C-alpha cells in the first residue's frame, strides 16, 4: 500500500517522503502509536518506496519489488516478532538477525528489519540489539513498532528517530467503517468510541455494540439500593468472559466520561445519541462524585484485567454506582 | 531519488574524534590525557554514564590515542592507518565487542585465549566491551584473573549505562570514569557547530528547543535535530520544530494551568481537547505539565528562580504573574496529582480520560488549611470553652469534658479529645484523689460499697494477689469488726479465699484498715443471694460496658465524626480507647 492510500498522519508521511527524497532516511525509527492507527501500513509504504524500481517519492505499487513487499515475501525484509510459543523476542532471534543483516542484500540496495512489537524484547535481547541499532551492518534500515515508546530502554530510544502516530480522527475511522458497509449511526458512534484505533473500531462493530449499550443503560436506570436484586441481576447478566466484561466496562466508562463532561460544562460527548438519558444521570450527582465514579470504573477494569472475579467486581462497582446516584447531591457541593 | 547514497545520521557523522571535541566531559578527557602524558595509563577502564554522553566515543578515541602510528599522544592524529582502521571498526588489534550479544563464558574464554598473543602491528591489543553490564555472572568471574593482571600489551575499556550491575570484583579492578549529563549550553554549542557545518539555517530558539529535548544526552539531541532536518531541509522554521519534536506549546500549558487555578472545569477539558487535536501524546503533555508546575513551584518558593530554571526572562515573568498569591501547598498537591497521573497514563488504555479526570481534580481542589492553623483554632476553642457559650455538640460533652480539660492541663501536649483518654486510668486517678467522679453516673444501692471498694484498694497496695481475689467476691455485710464476703459456689475463688493462709492475710488487712479486731466470714453465694450481690469485678465489667456504650452514643452523634463519615463514605466499625 503506497503512502497515497494511507488515511491521516499527514505530518508523518510528509516527513518520511521528504527524507526519502532527500536521501536523509535515518537507519533506525521507532513508530509509536495506538494499535490500529496504521503504523505497520506506513512502515510497509516506506519500505515499498525505498525498494520501488520507479524511484519516485511514492511507491508505484505495481513493480515486482512493490508487489513482493506488499505480499510479505521480499527477501530483504526481516520480520522480528516473538516466536509463536514465546512471550518475548529472545536474544537468539537478535543474534540470528545480526547474522542476517551482516549478509549482502539479495535484490534491494539495503536490508530492512521490522520489529513488532518492539516492547516485547526482553532485557537481554534489547541490550544485545543496541550495538546493531546504533551502527547497523551494511546500511540496514530498522523500524521498531510499539504502542508505547516509554516501555523501550532509554538507550534504545536514544538511537532511533521517534515517529509518533496520533490516534486516527473519528471521521477517518467513520469513513472506513462506512466503506465496509456499516450503518451510518453505528459508524459514527463506533468511530467516537474507538479512541482513534481502527482495530478497536472493527471490534466494536462486531460486538453488536448498540444493543449492549442499550441494555447497560437500561440496567443503570433501574439501579435501586433498596431493591438489591436490580443490582445483582445486572451483574449476573452483564458479566461474561473477560473480554466481554472489559467491553462492558469500556462502555460504562464512556457513559461516565460523558456524565462528567456534561457536569463540567463540556458538550463534546461521545454518546451524543444518548445525550438526554445521560443528562438524567448527570443531574443526580456532583462533579467530584462523577470523577470518583469514573476512576472507580477504571480501577475495576484494572482488576478485571488482573483476573479478578468479574461478577464480584461488578457487584461492588454497581452498588457504588447505585449509591452515588441514589443520594441527592449534598448542598454546597462542587458543581 | 537518492536511495543509494549512504546517509549517515548526524549522531554518527559527528561522533567526537578527539578529546577536545568531547563536549561536557572535560574531567574525563583531562584524566585520560594526563595519564597518557605521564605514562600512567591503567590497563582497565570502566566508562559509565547515561545514554548518549560519549562513552563509546571516548573508548574509541582512547584506543586511537594509544595505537596511533605517530606515537602515544594526547590527541590521535585520525589520519594514520591505525587511526582510520579503528574508526572504521576493522582494526585487527582493537576489538570492539558487543557485551550484550557476546555475554557468555564461552566468549570470555575465547577472549582470554586471544589476550595471550602479541598485537600484530599496533602497540596495544585493546578490548572495548560495550554494554558490559549484560555479561553473565560466570563471564564476569572468568574475566577476573585476566582483568587483574593482563599482559603488558593489553588494555581493557568497558562501557556501560548501568555500572551498578557489575560485580564489585570487576569494579575494583578498573579505573572508573563517570560521565556527566551534558549541560544545555554545551549541547546548544555543539548543535550550532553541526548546523553551521551542514549549512543549515536555524534560529537559536529552535536550537534551544531541540537541545532541551535531549534531556542531557547529546545523542538524543542530535537525533532530534536530524529529525527536524529530515522534515525541514536546509532552512528550519521555528513553528515546525515544536510540532516535529512533539514539544507542547507553552501557550497551551499556560492556559491549562490558568483554568486549573481559576477552577474553570470546562477550560481544563478544553485544554485536553486541544492537546488531542494537535496530536500530541497525552504522556508528553502530562510530563510538560509536571515540568510547568515544577517551574511554578520554584518561582513561588525561591528568591532567584533564574538560577535554577533554564528559562528566558519573558517566560519567568509570565510564570511569576501566574503564580503570585497561590499557596505553595496547593501547587504541591496538584503536582502530586499530575505525577500520579503520569504513572497511570503509561499503563492505561485511555490516556485522554486519565488526563481529563486529573485536570478536573486539579481544578476542583479545595484550598487546604495548614495543620498548624487548625491546631491554633482548636487551642482557641479549648481555652474559650469555659467562658464562651459552646456550640451545641460541645455542650453535650462538657459534663464529662470537665475533668478531661483538667487532665489536659496536667499534660498540655496531649490533644483534647474524649476518644483519646482512658476511662480506666481516670477511674483510678480520681479515686486516689478521693473524688470518684463516676459515682453519680454509676451509683450503687449498697451503702457500704464505697468502704468495700476503699478496702480492696487498700489491700491492693499491700498484696495485689489478695486484692484481685477480693475483687471477685461480693460483699454481703460490712460492719465494724465484721465482714462477710460471698463467692460463687464451687468457684476457684471460693476455695482460695477459704484457704487459712489467705484468710489470715485478709484479716490482717482488715485490722490495719479499720483499726479493730475483725471477723472475716466467707460464704458461698446461694440461690437467695443471687442477683442481689455483685462483685467488684462484675461491677467493673458492667461499668466498662456502660462507659463504652456511652462513648459509642457520643461518637455516633458527634458532628465531626459524622462529617468524616460523609466525606469519606465510611461507616463506624469500632470504637477503641487509646491510652
Image (cartoon, coloured by chain):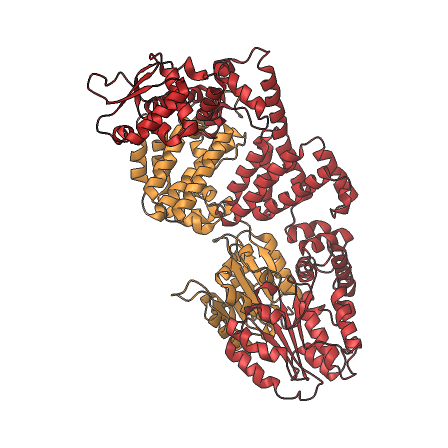
Chain colours: A orange, B red
Which residue is located at x 52 percent, y 41 percent? B354
Left or right of B123: which side holds B543?
A: left
Residue B526 in sight from this viewpoint? yes
* Coordinates of residue B522 in the picture (x, y in percent): 27, 23
Number of on-image labels: 0
Q: Is residue A33 shown above or below A136?
A: above
Q: Is residue B254 shown above or below B450?
A: below
* Coordinates of residue B55 in the picture (x, y in percent): 67, 68
Q: Camera-side residue: B93 or A51?
A: B93
Q: Quadrant of residue A155?
A: bottom right
Left or right of B233: which side holds A81?
A: left
Q: Camera-side residue: A296 or A54?
A: A296
Residue most toward the front?
B517
Q: Is residue A320 shown above or below B48?
A: above
* Coordinates of residue B377 in the picture (x, y in percent): 61, 22
Left or right of A155: which side holds A75?
A: left
Left or right of A113: which side holds A21?
A: right
Q: Camera-side residue: B240 or B41?
A: B41
Which residue is located at x 56 percent, y 28 percent? B414
* Coordinates of residue B382 in the picture (x, y in percent): 58, 19
Residue B544 in sight from this viewpoint? no
Q: Is residue B135 shown above or below B208?
A: below
Amino acid at each position: 500500500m503506497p503512502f497515497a492510500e494511507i488515511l491521516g498522519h499527514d505530518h508523518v508521511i510528509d516527513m518520511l517522503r521528504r527524507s526519502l527524497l532527500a536521501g536523509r532516511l535515518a537507519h533506525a525509527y521507532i513508530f509509536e502509536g495506538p494499535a490500529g492507527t496504521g503504523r505497520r501500513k506506513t512502515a510497509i509504504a516506506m519500505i515499498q518506496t525505498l525498494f520501488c524500481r520507479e524511484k519516485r517519492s511514492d511507491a508505484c505499487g505495481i513493480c515486482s519489488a512493490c508487489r513482493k513487499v506488499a505480499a510479505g515475501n521480499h527477501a530483504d525484509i526481516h520480520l522480528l516478532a516473538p516466536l509463536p510459543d514465546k512471550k518475548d523476542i529472545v536474544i537468539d532471534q537478535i543474534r540470528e538477525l545480526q547474522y542476517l543483516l551482516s549478509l549482502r542484500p539479495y535484490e534491494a540496495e539495503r536490508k530492512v528489519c521490522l520489529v513488532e512489537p518492539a516492547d516485547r524484547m526482553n532485557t537481554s535481547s534489547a541490550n544485545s540489539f543496541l550495538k546493531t541499532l546504533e551502527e547497523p551492518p551494511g546500511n540496514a534500515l530498522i523500524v521498531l513498532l510499539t504502542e508505547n515508546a516509554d516501555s523501550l530502554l532509554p538507550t534504545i530510544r536514544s538511537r532511533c528517530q521517534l515517529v509518533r502516530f496520533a490516534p486516527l480522527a473519528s471521521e477517518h475511522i467513520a469513513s472506513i467503517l462506512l466503506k465496509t458497509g456499516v450503518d451510518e449511526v453505528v459508524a459514527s458512534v463506533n468511530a467516537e468510541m474507538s479512541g482513534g484505533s481502527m482495530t478497536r473500531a472493527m471490534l466494536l462493530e462486531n460486538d453488536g455494540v448498540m444493543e449492549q449499550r442499550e441494555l447497560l443503560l437500561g440496567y443503570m436506570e433501574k439501579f435501586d439500593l433498596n431493591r438489591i436484586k436490580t443490582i445483582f441481576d445486572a451483574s449476573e447478566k452483564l458479566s461474561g468472559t473477560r473480554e466481554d466484561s472489559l467491553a462492558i466496562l469500556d462502555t460504562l466508562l464512556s457513559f461516565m466520561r460523558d456524565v462528567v463532561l456534561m457536569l463540567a460544562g463540556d458538550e463534546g460527548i461521545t454518546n451524543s445519541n444518548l445525550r438526554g438519558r445521560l443528562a438524567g444521570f448527570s443531574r443526580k450527582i456532583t462533579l467530584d462524585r462523577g470523577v470518583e465514579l469514573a476512576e472507580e470504573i477504571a480501577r475495576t477494569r484494572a482488576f478485571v484485567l488482573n483476573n479478578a472475579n468479574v461478577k464480584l467486581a461488578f457487584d461492588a462497582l454497581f452498588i457504588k454506582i447505585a449509591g452515588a446516584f441514589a443520594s441527592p447531591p449534598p448542598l454546597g457541593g462542587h458543581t | 531519488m537518492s536511495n543509494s547514497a549512504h546517509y549517515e545520521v548526524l549522531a554518527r557523522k559527528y561522533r567526537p574524534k578527539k578529546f577536545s571535541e568531547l563536549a561536557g566531559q572535560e574531567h574525563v578527557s583531562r584524566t585520560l590525557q594526563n595519564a597518557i602524558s605521564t605514562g600512567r595509563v591503567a590497563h582497565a577502564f570502566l566508562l559509565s554514564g547515561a545514554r548518549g554522553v560519549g562513552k563509546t566515543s571516548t573508548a574509541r578515541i582512547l584506543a586511537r590515542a594509544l595505537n596511533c602510528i605517530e606515537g602515544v599522544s594526547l590527541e590521535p592524529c585520525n589520519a594514520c592507518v591505525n587511526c582510520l582502521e579503528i574508526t572504521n571498526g576493522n582494526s585487527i588489534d582493537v576489538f570492539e565487542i558487543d557485551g550484550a550479544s557476546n555475554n557468555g563464558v564461552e566468549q570470555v574464554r575465547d577472549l582470554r585465549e586471544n589476550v595471550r598473543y602479541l598485537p600484530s602491528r599496533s602497540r596495544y591489543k585493546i578490548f572495548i566491551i560495550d554494554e558490559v553490564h549484560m555479561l553473565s555472572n560466570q563471564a564476569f568471574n572468568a574475566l577476573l584473573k585476566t582483568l587483574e593482571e593482563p599482559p603488558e600489551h593489553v588494555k581493557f575499556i568497558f562501557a556501560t549505562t548501568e555500572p551498578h550491575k557489575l560485580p564489585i570484583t570487576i569494579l575494583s579492578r578498573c579505573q572508573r570514569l563517570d560521565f556527566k549529563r551534558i549541560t544545555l549550553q554545551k549541547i546548544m554549542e555543539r548543535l550550532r557547530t553541526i548546523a553551521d557545518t551542514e549549512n543549515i539555517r536555524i534560529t537559536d530558539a529552535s536550537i534551544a528547543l531541540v537541545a532541551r529535548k535531549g534531556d542531557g544526552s547529546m545523542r538524543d539531541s542530535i537525533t532530534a535535530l536530524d529529525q527536524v532536518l529530515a522534515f525541514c531541509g536546509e532552512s528550519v522554521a521555528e513553528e515546525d520544530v515544536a510540532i516535529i519534536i512533539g514539544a507542547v506549546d507553552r501557550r497551551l500549558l499556560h492556559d491549562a494551568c490558568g483554568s486549573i487555578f481559576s477552577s474553570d472545569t470546562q477550560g481544563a477539558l478544553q485544554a485536553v481537547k486541544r492537546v488531542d487535536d494537535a496530536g500530541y501524546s497525552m504522556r508528553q503533555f502530562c510530563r510538560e505539565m509536571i515540568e510547568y508546575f515544577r517551574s511554578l513551584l520554584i518561582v513561588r518558593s525561591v528568591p532567584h528562580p533564574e538560577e535554577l530554571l533554564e528559562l528566558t526572562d519573558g517566560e519567568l515573568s509570565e510564570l511569576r504573574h501566574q503564580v503570585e498569591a497561590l499557596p505553595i501547598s496547593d501547587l504541591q498537591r496538584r503536582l502530586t496529582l499530575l505525577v500520579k497521573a503520569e504513572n497511570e497514563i503509561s499503563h492505561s488504555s485511555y490516556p485522554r480520560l486519565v488526563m481529563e479526570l486529573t485536570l478536573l481534580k486539579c481544578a476542583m481542589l479545595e484550598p487546604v488549611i495548614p495543620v498548624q492553623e487548625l491546631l491554633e483554632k482548636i487551642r482557641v476553642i479549648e481555652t474559650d470553652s469555659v467562658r464562651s457559650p459552646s456550640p451545641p455538640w460541645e455542650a453535650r460533652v462538657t459534663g464529662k469534658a470537665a475533668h478531661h480539660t483538667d487532665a489536659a492541663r496536667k499534660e498540655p501536649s496531649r490533644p483534647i479529645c474524649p476518644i483519646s483518654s482512658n476511662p480506666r486510668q481516670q477511674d483510678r486517678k480520681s479515686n486516689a484523689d478521693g473524688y470518684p467522679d463516676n459515682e453519680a453516673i454509676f451509683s450503687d444501692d449498697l451503702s457500704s460499697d464505697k468502704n468495700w471498694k476503699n478496702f480492696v484498694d487498700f489491700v491492693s497496695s499491700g498484696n495485689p494477689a489478695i486484692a484481685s481475689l477480693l475483687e471477685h467476691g461480693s460483699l454481703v455485710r460490712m460492719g465494724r469488726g465484721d465482714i462477710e464476703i460471698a463467692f460463687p459456689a464451687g468457684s476457684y475463688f471460693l476455695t482460695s479465699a477459704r484457704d487459712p493462709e489467705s484468710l489470715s492475710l485478709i484479716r490482717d488487712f482488715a485490722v490495719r484498715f479499720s483499726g479493730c479486731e475483725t471477723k472475716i466470714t466467707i460464704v458461698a453465694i446461694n440461690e437467695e443471694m443471687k442477683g442481689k450481690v455483685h462483685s467488684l469485678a462484675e461491677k467493673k465489667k458492667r461499668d466498662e460496658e456502660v462507659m463504652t456504650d456511652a462513648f459509642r452514643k457520643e461518637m455516633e452523634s458527634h458532628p465531626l465524626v459524622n462529617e468524616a463519615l460523609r466525606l469519606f463514605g465510611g461507616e463506624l466499625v469500632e470504637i477503641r480507647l487509646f491510652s
